[in-house]
Image: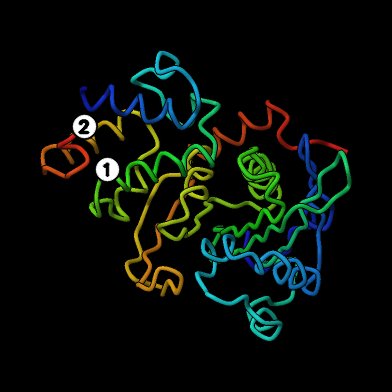
Amino acid sequence: MSPSDRARQIVANALHVDVTAVPADADVATLTGWDSIAHVNIMMVLEELAAGQLTSDDVGNLFSVAAISAFLASLAASGANGMAQA
Amino acid sequence: MSKRQGIPRFRQPILTPRFELQPIGRWMAIRLQHTYLRDAEIRSLLTMGHKPPGWLKLLRGTRRANGKTRFYHAIVDRSTGATIGYHAVFVTAWKTATFLVIVGDKAWWGKGVVPEIRKALIIALVRHGGMAQISSRVQSHNYSSMLNYAKLGFEKTGMLHMSGYDEVRGKPADYLVFSLRGQKMLDAVEKWEAEGALVSE
């Protein structure tokens, strides 16, 4: 699964919607269901995937599918455990 | 305007579609914080302390609402009249304000309380207080607060590394700075006014 598709899936799971409802260019402003509880759930998944590599710098930027996708791609490049298996 | 001048609009309640922000004094602000900070989950996001702050600590940390640089509000559900949280606005520097919020009633978590009340507050701060910037710091594990700022168009503008100690996680805590300013803020205010974010009585 590509980082973009993985990011869409993570967001869709947190919002309890089908992945087709989460376009690749979606962000917190365009997806009304992306509320604070959904965001906490997204960040918890990313924390787990990042295995300690989610920095304070990262968390202040992950407000769109594209940003999450870029973060997942960087994790895959660095060989983080969760992404190596994803 | 200088930060020494008052903002008379903040002496009156601020209404949003669902909530009323009722101006409160220092004692009520302390009482609400004391009540809400007994909750460990709320505390882990704000004070990062194992124990609830005592009255004396809150007394020292909550100065008098002076109508110029410190404004405290109870967040009241307009449909029931129940107080569900606490909000503070501090004018920290020239034309710059910062926020602090506690939504104490967890039944309201995830229901857009904070973005809704902040739209109205920012409109009032810009139109009646002449603010040019809203800038707040958020503990790096407070994901819901970050989301609330991002939803309003705030951008991460800085990082305060290890500027606090997180007793709950047992390590130093970073803070992120989120800001909204300039034309972007004015455009947002116009949009929110058109949406009716600040309700007239």
Element carrying mark 2: loop
Residue B79 in percent (x, y) is at 87, 38
Instruction: State the image coordinates of residue B55 (x, y, percent, origin top left).
Output: 71, 82
Q: Return the chain for callout 2.
A: A
Q: Observer-nearest residue: B39 or B1? A: B39
In this image, B139 relative to B6: left or right?
Answer: left
Q: Is residue B1 above or below residue B191?
A: below
Q: Which residue is mark 1?
A: A49
Q: Nearer the viewer, residue B68 or B35?
A: B35
**What amino acid type should be assigned to the residue bearing mark 2?**
Ala
Label 1 element class: helix
> Residue sitting at 46 percent across and 32 percent down?
A14
Q: Looking at the rendering, in which quadrant would you find the N terminus of chain B?
A: bottom right
From the viewer's perspective, tell me whether residue A74 is left or right of residue B100.
Answer: left
Q: Chain of mark 1?
A: A
The reply to whether discs 2 and 1 touch (Cβ–Cβ < 8 Å) is: yes
Can you identify the residue that label 2 sits on? A86
